[in-house]
Image (tube, rainbow, N blue to C red):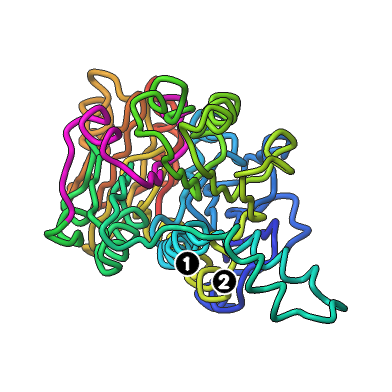
């Protein structure tokens, strides 16, 4: 029986993926085997020795201490693509609403309540909210993953010319893109052509302030910028300077901050990207499935700190080893198994930076002391026998 702790409210559809005959949901557990989390900050949360995995019901994992988890042999999962449709729809809505100044127009119209001649005031005042149509304009999309590809395709359907930049585009994402999306090799090729610019990349040290003073200087005057990915991807100071100079006409952002609020030309929404019941369900179901498969079978899918490793169970016992990615690690592991007269029916090993994961299906007389012997190897971080 695996004990699962939830740090946020998790959709019942997700919890249903953890049947009661195999999993116990205990939100007060001091020694859980797995944690399901959405937005709760875990950086000050103790990581008990029992903890094997954390599944984030969402894409971003900056609320989880990744390095500490890796060092402790705790697999961290996320759910890429589960909220993609929700975010993409919001971006498409922001393209339309932002271009037509709908937020300001609605606020202005609310102020007409109580006027004697509303119709006359409407006809007189609506000119201040005139905005361009999207058809025929050019949208630049930075990042063509699950969300970026959907946004690009929606913009094509709206009649826009769409340019895409993603040096790391996956095969699946490439197949999902409309043939009308033009691929740009560099940002320098794309930015000067864009009337609208939207960013859809994960927040990493290397992507922080992707939109900055230099990249904004390459844009045409009056560009409209959208950020529904992560606030840190945009240098707010540089953005506000570009707004003052007219380089940027409007900034649409899902991440309000003190310096952005109340600024003319900035439209902030309160992190609504994944705030749909469908998205919350999709994320919870995927996170629970990932957690279940790892705890029961040792398979890893969509981990941010370990390589993805998955293979069908072949019978016998399964040995799961998280270890340092160092020379001689595999030979040390197989040496222990050979000395124990175990037959390796199946083995897969993959690495991710400094850490690796080896999955072995074995037959033979597997003694209780084997896990301790494997754990004693210098490269070993965590050993499980299923």
Residue 356 picture quarter: top left
Tell me: residue 345, above or below residue 155: above
State the residue at coordinates (35%, 45%). 195
State the residue at coordinates (60%, 44%). 265
- How much space separates mark 2 and mark 1, taking CA atoms? 7 Å
Q: Residue furthest right?
A: 114
Residue 324 at x, y percent in the picture: 36, 25
- For disc 1, the marked residue is 86
Does dot 2 land on a helix, a strand or a loop? Answer: loop
Say if residue 291 shows up in the picture. Answer: no
Of the image marks 2 and 1, the number of the one nearer the N terminus: 1
**363 to the left or right of 139:** left
The quadrant of the rendering that contains the C terminus is bottom left
Tags 2 and 1 touching, CB below 8 Å: yes
Crowd around label 2: few <14 · some 14–19 · many ≥20 (10 Å): some
State the residue at coordinates (38%, 44%). 197
Image: magenta residue range:
181-208
**60 to the left or right of 353:** right
Disc number placed over residue 276 in the picture, else none: 2
């Amino acid at each position: 029986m695996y004990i699962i702790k939830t740090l946020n409210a998790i959709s019942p559809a997700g919890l249903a993926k953890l049947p009661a005959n195999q999993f116990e949901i205990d939100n007060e557990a001091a020694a859980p085997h797995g944690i399901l989390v959405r937005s709760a900050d875990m950086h000050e949360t103790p990581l008990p020795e029992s903890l094997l995995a954390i599944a984030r019901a969402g894409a971003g994992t900056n609320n989880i201490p990744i390095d500490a988890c890796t060092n402790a042999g705790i697999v961290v999962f996320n759910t890429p693509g589960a909220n993609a449709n929700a975010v993409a729809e919001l971006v498409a809505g922001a393209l339309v609403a932002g271009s037509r100044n709908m937020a300001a127009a609605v606020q202005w119209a609310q102020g007409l309540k109580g006027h004697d001649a509303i119709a006359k005031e409407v006809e007189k005042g609506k000119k201040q909210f005139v905005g361009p149509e999207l058809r025929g304009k050019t949208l630049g999309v930075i990042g063509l993953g699950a969300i970026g590809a959907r946004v690009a395709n929606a913009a094509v359907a709206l009649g826009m010319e769409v340019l895409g930049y993603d040096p790391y585009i996956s095969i699946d994402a490439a197949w999902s893109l409309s043939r009308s999306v033009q691929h740009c090799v560099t940002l320098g090729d794309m930015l000067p052509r864009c009337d609208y610019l939207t960013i859809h990349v994960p927040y990493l040290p290397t992507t922080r302030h992707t939109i900055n003073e230099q990249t904004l200087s390459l844009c045409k005057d009056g560009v409209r910028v959208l950020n529904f990915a992560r606030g840190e991807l945009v240098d707010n100071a540089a953005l506000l300077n570009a707004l003052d100079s007219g380089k940027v006409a409007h900034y649409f952002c899902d991440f309000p901050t003190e310096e952005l609020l109340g600024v003319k030309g900035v439209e902030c929404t309160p992190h609504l990207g994944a705030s749909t019941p469908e998205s919350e369900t999709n994320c919870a179901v995927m996170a629970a499935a990932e957690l279940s498969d790892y705890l029961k079978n040792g398979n890893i899918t969509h981990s941010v700190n370990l390589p993805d490793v998955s293979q069908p169970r072949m019978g016998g016992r399964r040995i799961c080893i998280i270890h340092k990615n160092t020379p001689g690690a595999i030979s040390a592991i197989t040496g222990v198994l050979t000395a124990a007269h175990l037959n390796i029916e199946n083995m897969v090993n993959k690495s991710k930076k400094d850490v690796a994961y080896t999955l072995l299906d074995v037959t033979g007389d597997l003694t209780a002391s084997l896990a301790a012997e494997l754990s004693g190897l210098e490269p070993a971080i965590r050993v499980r026998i299923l």
